[in-house]
Image: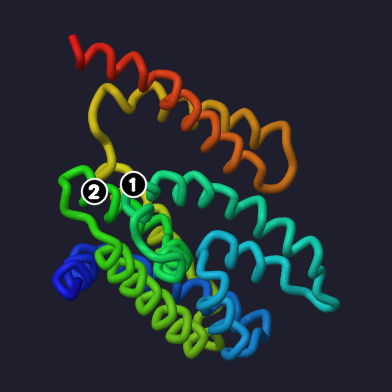
Amino acid sequence: MQNGFMQGIRATLPVSASVAAYGSVLGVLAAQKSVAWGTLMAMNVFIFAGSSQFVMIDMWNQPLPVLEMALAVLVINLRYLLAGASMQPLLYSTSRIRQFLAVHLVTDESWAVTMTALRRGEATVSYLVGAGLCVLGAWCAGTMVGMGFGAVVSSPEAFALDFAFTAVFTALAVSLWRGNEDALPWIVALAVSILAAEVLPGKWHIVIGAVSGALTAAIGQPQEVAHAAQ
């Protein structure tokens, strides 16, 4: 258990540096919106989803549009239904408490690192928890540092901090690429999300693109299995 936990931390350390970097951008934005550090830390721990937290801070105006914030966060985080479902082979044999803890710590980064390890037969629940806690620590540290510099840094893009978000997800995508078998689902997800973004308001394109890609992969999987059997 301890070995798996430490392996998860070590595997996630490189990407956690980028997590801290774009977390600092969120901290700067939160400071400019006069969000209290305790409020931001609570968001980090209980919501722990970078993209939705950026949306919440962007919507942070008095009086707070609580309902609109909640709906926006729900839409953006629906993709974690798919991420959680993909973790079923790893989580099915563990206790409910450990399942809830592990699933709460699933982020795009910890999920990608753990899925890569799962394909190699090296992932465990402890691995996932270690990876998730490593990302959480980096995220909290980055946002707090950003809040400290919020009064000084008026334009994060001037320091290219806004590019960290793009960089880390590009690296994650490369690590998950398995070759030609992933091409069609990825192309479908990209095309559908771009089209949805043009015609639908809000963040629905994230969910629609993810579901489209997942369905494409699911439809093609039986064919891949049959081909492998031959």
* Crowd class of label 2 (few under 14; some 14 to 19; many from 20; radius 10 Å): some
Residue occupying image coordinates x 45% and y 20% = 219
168 and 124: which one is in front?
124
Marks counted in the figure total 2
Which SS class for mark 1?
helix
Q: What residue did someone put label 1 on?
A: 89
Q: From where the camera sits, is residue 176 visible?
A: yes
User: Seen from this angle, which residue lies furthest top?
Assistant: 230
Residue occupying image coordinates x 32% and y 43% = 173
Q: Amino acid at mark 2?
A: Leu
Horizontal side of residue 31 vs 141, given as left or right:
right
Give the image quarter of residue 198. Answer: top right
Q: From where the camera sits, is residue 167 visible?
A: no
Give the image quarter of residue 98. Answer: bottom left
Where is residue 78 shown, x and y percent of the image? 59, 49
Where is residue 182 shown, x and y percent of the image? 32, 28
Where is residue 205 shown, x and y percent of the image? 62, 39
Horizontal side of residue 144 vs 89, given as left or right:
right
Residue occupying image coordinates x 57% and y 82% = 42
Alpha carbon distance from label 1 to label 2: 9 Å
Where is residue 86 shown, x and y percent of the image? 40, 44
Res. 118 mark: 2
Residues at circles 1 and 2 in contact by the CB criterion of under 8 Å? yes
Q: Nearer the viewer, mark 1 or mark 2?
A: 1
Which SS class for mark 2?
helix
116 and 230: which one is in front?
230
Q: Is residue 162 above or below residue 80?
A: below
